[in-house]
Image: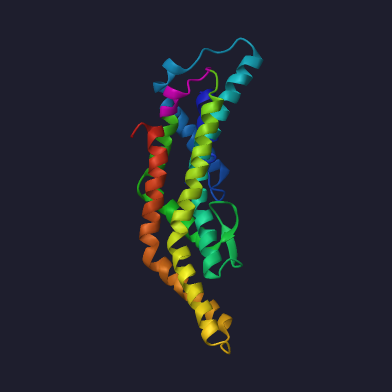
Amino acid sequence: MLLVFVRLGAALMLMPGFGEAYISPRIRLLIALTVSVVVLPILPPVLPALPDSAMALFLLIFGEVFVGFFLGSVSRILMAALSIGGMMIAMVTGLANALTNDPTAAQQGSIAGSFLSMMALLIIITLDLHHVLLRGVIESYQIFVPGQPLLVGDFSEMVTRVVSKTFLLGFQIASPFVAVALIFNLGLGLLSRLMPQMQVFFIAIPLQIVVGLGILMIALPALLAWFIAGFEEVMLPFAGLR
């Protein structure tokens, strides 16, 4: 029971929807205990025997914590794509200095990033992808058997791939805004050359914000759908669904 709770608790501490900072720690603890009790009857064949020494038990628990942190970190790193894309959007729309509290990242972030993170979290829960995350932790016992040596090299390679996927998703989310901002700034530069007496910045800043909000309103469904597709591409193999 302790080994199952350690892996599940470490994973749920970081997973989107379960490990948010604004969720009470008691509720998260209760969820971890409940899920551990539910899945315990199906896991005895893969659980090792009780070690004879305290050091062996400590190493066993450490391995389970490490695996749980790895599983939770993969999904949490993917959520960072929204913060990256949101900051890019804020940079090209003139909202980079307007920071607000990002509840999913538990830190200050751009308005666009906070909004996208909350919307993505809502969609993840609506589509029951948080159940896929839980299934991934349970299915992980078939890959990362308790008591077996940790696959540190494979862990490192997977984290590297997820980080690169996160930056790619962030840039793809912000790509419509980057393209429009490039055309917009080229037009402003041409206008300033044709009419030097016009104060371009007084016109550009409000117009840049309006154009950015308009693009966000139009492209929001496509942006979130693209992120969810990338999220599923990484997380579904953990649950044995792809």
Residue 62: where, in percent of width, then height?
60, 25
Q: Is residue 99 left or right of residue 221?
A: right
Q: Residue at x 55, y 77 (%)?
A: 205
Q: Residue at x 60, y 64 (%)?
A: 99
Residue 178: where, in percent of width, then height?
48, 63
Nearer to us in this view, 234 or 201: 201
Is 143 part of what is drawn in magenta?
yes
Q: Residue at x 52, y 69 (%)?
A: 93
Q: Residue at x 50, y 43 (%)?
A: 164
Q: Is residue 123 left or right of residue 161?
A: left
Q: How did the renderer colour the structure? A: rainbow
Residue found farthest to the right: 55
| 103 lies above or below 11 | below
Residue found farthest to the top: 52
| 131 lies above or below 116 | above
Residue 174: where, in percent of width, then height?
47, 59
Q: What stretch of residues is rendered in magenta?
A: 139-148
On the question of residue 125 being in view, the answer is no
Quadrant occupied by the C terminus: top left
Q: Is residue 95 left or right of residue 169?
A: right
| 240 lies above or below 131 | above
Residue 64 lies in quadrant: top right
